[in-house]
Image (tube, coloured by chain):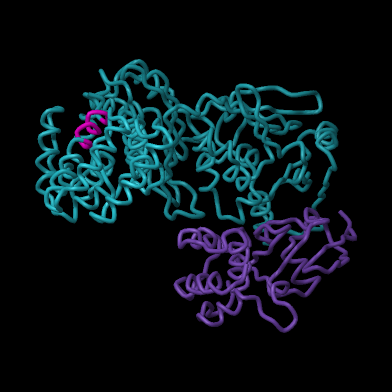
Chain colours: A purple, B cyan
Amino acid sequence: MNRERLSLKVNGEEHFVETYPMERLLDVLREKLRLTGTKEGCGEGECGACSVLIDGKLVNSCLVPVAQVRGAEIITIEGLASEELLHPVQIAFLECGGAQCGMCTPGMIVATACLLKRHPHPTEEQIREGLNGNLCRCTGYMRIFQAVSMAAATESV
Amino acid sequence: MRSDPAEYTFLSPASLAEALDLLRAKPGNWLPVAGGTEVMVQYSAGKLASRNLLSLWGLPELSEIAELEDSFRIGGGCTFAQLREHEAVQRFFPMLATAAAWTGSIANQNRATLAGNIVNASPAADSPPALLAYEAELELISAAGTRRLPYDEFHLGYKKTALRPEELVLAVHLPKHYESWFTYTRKVGSREAQAISKICIAGAGKLKSGSVESLHIGIGAVAPTPLRLRHVESLLLGKPLTKKQIAKSKLVLQDEIAPIEDIRSSVQYRRQVAENLLEDLLLTFALSGEDPLTSSVTALDSWNDLDLLTAAEKILPCCSSVRWADRMANARPIANLDQMLEVADKTWLELSEQDWNEAFRSHPRIGERKAAPVTSQSAAWSRNEQSGAAAASEEIQQALKAGNEAYETRFGRTYIVCATGRSAEEMLLDLHRRLRNTDRTELQEVVEQQRQITRLRLRKWLGL
């Protein structure tokens, strides 16, 4: 099959890319748009390192053929901070030391931002469920959970 | 090896009709893909057999949930996120909502669809046992029209289904009448989130005069397909759920299932867990019995048989002191109602004041529904017991409210009275009288009231 010209709306900006429809959204973001904040972990929807928001919903971008996001609104980790100002969730992760090697961090932060939209004051159970698809092999999760609680306490919703 | 996207044809039809036409033109040529949570995993691993994909994602004809007269029609393209959050699904088909919440992570639930889960035909999938227990019917569609097929007849063998190459799963139909049935579902996996089931069970049933009137049980990961336990069901049908029957059903179960050994579990483990889950399902079912005459013997019988923790949990709504419930569970076996009441009284009176207070706190104020009772059963009983207060005039209700407040200021706890059969006026008189009590006398009174409440609840619970 030939490449197609696709229009994608990423972080509020419209991009045109030449791509095969079966290209994974993850690869298009990283290789065509150079948005390398989104990471590839397992490549099979288990680890959440490639989490992005599609129309406000948390999705693993490794499992999405790019043809399926035509017309959709995509937010990646690069789209959370505004200009110089970090997103409250990013600040909380920095403050609490919610990252070590950093591989899972963009996915964790995107998943957290999504969780706090749904539950501005999440219970511990809601935090654990909201992040249950994001694996971290360094931190042991406790500092990540602390960061989420801190973000929930500071973010003005 | 990663797959090369250049080698794949990928079409996104704009409508269901267009998709069906494509399927009719070249049956078997196309692999339908919705949220991609299965297909894209194989693709990434270079293991996807088909090179021609047909995207169904976002087709509105597939993603509706509609209420019909006797059933709900759930579009095959509904995602698990949609299912778990849908009010009617939660209310009418709680086991399906639960299974949806068990499936993968939030990110996967946002993409994975019900039809995808069905046609992928994994014997370990989470939604099939619930669909079997609810006797789901599939609505299959091709360019030639639709046909209906009981879900139970859909899986023909390992990853083999009755779906024709030109067909799609349009919708799943679930009858509404299950709203009033007993249901039970449980999954055993290595982790609460994400993990694929080692065993997953779902059951829906009805008791009549203590005997099994209806029972459907679906179970996953114990056979090449999701399995309806027809033999276990027919053994139990029309009979009371005695210990003996439950023991027999476990033997029948072992003949009915054929689990395999894989990376998640051994055969031995799966057989044992399947048996444990069936037993737990049936014991819970027996205890759900409302009919007083026959189920009572079984209810006490079953309770005597539970493990310590579960037994304590089950009796807790009768008197919400954890220590009381523990001691009751420890006092088993209890032979009959008389002995039960005697042990209950003695245990209650021997508790500390702290334990008593714990039990008192679980009661809502008389005339008020708002409270934080320990269990939903205890809340339901309170409503029933206090129906006299609920029926009172506005004036009496106000007086009760003021009385309650005075009582709380005076004694530091909620006013409790064995309200069953008492009118609001009687309770108001009692409240005013007790306001004049000394601390010591009032403590004795409230302990006695709770003792009476517990006795009534024990009778109700056991159906005697």
Tell me, yes or no, if residue B330 can be seen here: yes
Residue depicted at x 29% and y 38%: B428
Residue A87: percent from the left, percent from the top? Answer: 65, 76
Judge from the rendering whether residue A94 lies leftward or rightward of residue B40; answer left or right.
left
Dominant secondary structure of the magenta stretch?
helix
The image shows residue B257, relative to residue B308, as above or below, that is above
Picture quadrant of residue B306: top left
The answer to which quarter of the image holds residue B25 is top right
Kindly identify the residue that appears in the image at 23 percent across and 34 percent down: B303
Give the vertical position of A108 relative to B90 (above or below): below
Q: Please tell me whether residue B460 belongs to the stretch shown in magenta.
A: yes
Residue shown at 69% from the left, 49% from the top:
B35
**Left or right for B79, reference B306:** right
Q: In which quarter of the image is the N terminus of chain B?
A: bottom right
Q: Quadrant of residue B292?
A: top left
Is B429 in the magenta? no
In the rendered image, the quadrant that contains the C terminus of chain B is top left
* Label tally: 0
From the viewer's perspective, tell me whether residue B427 is left or right of residue A2: left
Whether B130 is drawn above or below B112: the answer is above
- Is residue B355 found left or right of B100 in the rendered image? left
Percent position (x, y) of residue A134?
Answer: 55, 64
Image location (x, y in percent) of residue B6? 82, 58
Instruction: Give the extent of the magenta segment.
Output: B453-461
- As rendered, which of A101 and B91 lies closer to the eye? B91
Residue displayed at 25% across by 33% down: B457
- Where residue B253 sits in the image (x, y, percent)? 36, 29
